[in-house]
Amino acid sequence: MTIQNPDDLIEDPQGGVPRLRRIMQRLRDPHTGCPWDIEQNFDTIVPYTIEEAYEVADAIARRNHADLCDELGDLLLQVVYHSQMAAENNSFTFDDVVRSIADKMVRRHPHVFGDDDRNKSAEQQTRDWETIKAAERGGSGSRTPSALDGVADGLPALTRAVKLQNRAARVGFDWPDAVHVLDKIAEETSELVAEIKSGDRAKIEEEYGDLLFVMANLARHLKIDPESALRGANRKFTRRFHAIEAVLAKDGRTPKQSTLEEMDGLWDQAKRDERGTP
């Protein structure tokens, strides 16, 4: 009986996830692998994991399915990478990761895989999901369990703000509507202005943070993802600034060789061009 060489899988285009896992094993082999990959650890790889997640979001925002396919592959590689490093120190394996998420999805969907009534609104199902999550988390040592438990510190700040606010809202700590949030924004803006006049840098940063936190709450009340909204604003700024640079380049100039007044006028023209207005 001929035993197949495990590395034959590397050249098999139909090898699927086992092929990808074998490639990662080879890359991490301490004797024959890639020196860069061998040197990596969880801490050094996590920035790439975060970056890949954002690149997935960017491909979706651009409605580019070819790029999305590619970026999802990059994100999957991150899962395989972390799992391989964990297997090397006997923490867990890729199969453990798959088993864990499969068990979790079944456990958290009793209305699909269990006896619960499926005839619920999406909002009720979301509340049920959070109830199950809270039960899974249980207590945190000797500390009294909190409605805010489980909101990861490492999330992007705006996203974490919304999640914290959602958790607090579920136990009744929330403004009744967006109008009250707008009033709070005005209050926080006044406090920021006062601290700017005082010149106290620490206080200025604190009040600016408070303002951002309330802005995230406004997005929540308006059912807007603040991260997505800001990414859209970033794309719009980039697009319009490129338009300014293109106009100036026709004259052989750069923004440094222009004036604020001229660039502001070109910015307004870029806005009109986007809107199709004269």
Image (cartoon, rainbow, N blue to C red):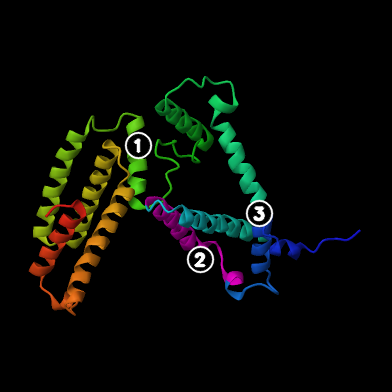
Mark 2 is surrounded, within 10 Å at the Cα level, by few (under 14), some (14 to 19) or many (20 or more) other residues, namely few
**Residue 21: % across, % down:** 66, 58
**Residue 87: % across, % down:** 66, 57
Q: CA–CA distance between discs 2 and 1?
A: 31 Å
SS under mark 3: helix
Magenta residues, as a range?
A: 37-61
Residue pictured at 52% horizontal, 19% vertical: 117
- In the image, is residue 264 above or below residue 185? below
Callout 3 amino acid: Gly
Give the quarter of the image for residue 19.
bottom right
Closest to the camera, between mark 2 and mark 3, is 3
The reply to whether dot 2 and dot 1 touch (C-beta < 8 Å) is no
The numbered disc on residue 16 is 3
Q: Which residue is mark 2?
A: 44
Residue 40 magenta: yes
Q: CA–CA distance between discs 2 and 3?
A: 26 Å
